[in-house]
Image (cartoon, helix red, strand yellow):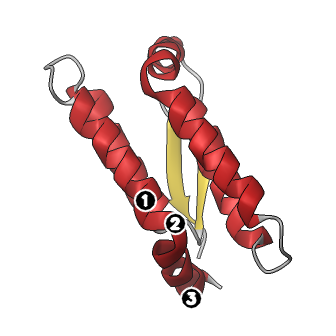
Amino acid sequence: MGCLGNIIWFVFGGFAGGLAWIIAGLLWCITIIGIPVGLQCFKFAELSFWPFGKEVIYGTSSFSLLVNIIWLIVCGFPLAVTHLISGILLSLTIIGIPFGKQSFKLARLALMPFGAQVINVR
């Protein structure tokens, strides 16, 4: 399902989701302090473009908690709501459930992206 799922995902919504992450990254890169946050957004844009065959592992640290709180206030909530609505709409059909799961994965990531790592499971 990996390659075919990624192609279908990209055509039917992955491009828009990845574009939202890129826009968030560009906005963060306007300031020097926000550049590390913007670079992280670009990494997650790739995941949003091609989510099948990848897992997200969440770590914990006090720095990532602080950055996640700031992120949630500035950009995280709108991205999470967008992915959540997309996931609900995709899950309305049996065929769309795997795509809805990917959208829910991205919604959780949008709420707390810092301290998270993306790994390939293939």
Name the residue tied to disc 3. 4
Q: Residue at x 39, y 47 (%)?
A: 20
Per the rendering, the mark at residue 88 is none
Disc with the residue nearer the chain's start (2 vs 3): 3
* Quarter containing the C terminus: bottom right
Disc with the residue nearer the chain's start (3 vs 1): 3
- Label 2 neighbourhood size at 10 Å, few (<14), some (14-19), many (20+)? some
Q: Residue at x 24, y 22 (%)?
A: 34
Q: Return the residue nearer the eye: 9 or 47.
A: 9
Q: Residue at x 65, y 55 (%)?
A: 86
Residue 109, by quadrant, is: top right
Q: Nearer the viewer, mark 2 or mark 3?
A: 2
Task: Determine whether the residue tagged by mark 1 lies in a helix, strand or loop.
Answer: helix
On screen, 92 above or below 43?
below
Left or right: residue 95 compared with residue 59: right
On screen, 71 above or below 8?
above
Q: CA distance from mark 1 to mark 2?
A: 5 Å
Name the residue tied to disc 1. 16
Q: CA distance from mark 3 to mark 1?
A: 18 Å
Q: Amino acid at mark 2?
A: Gly
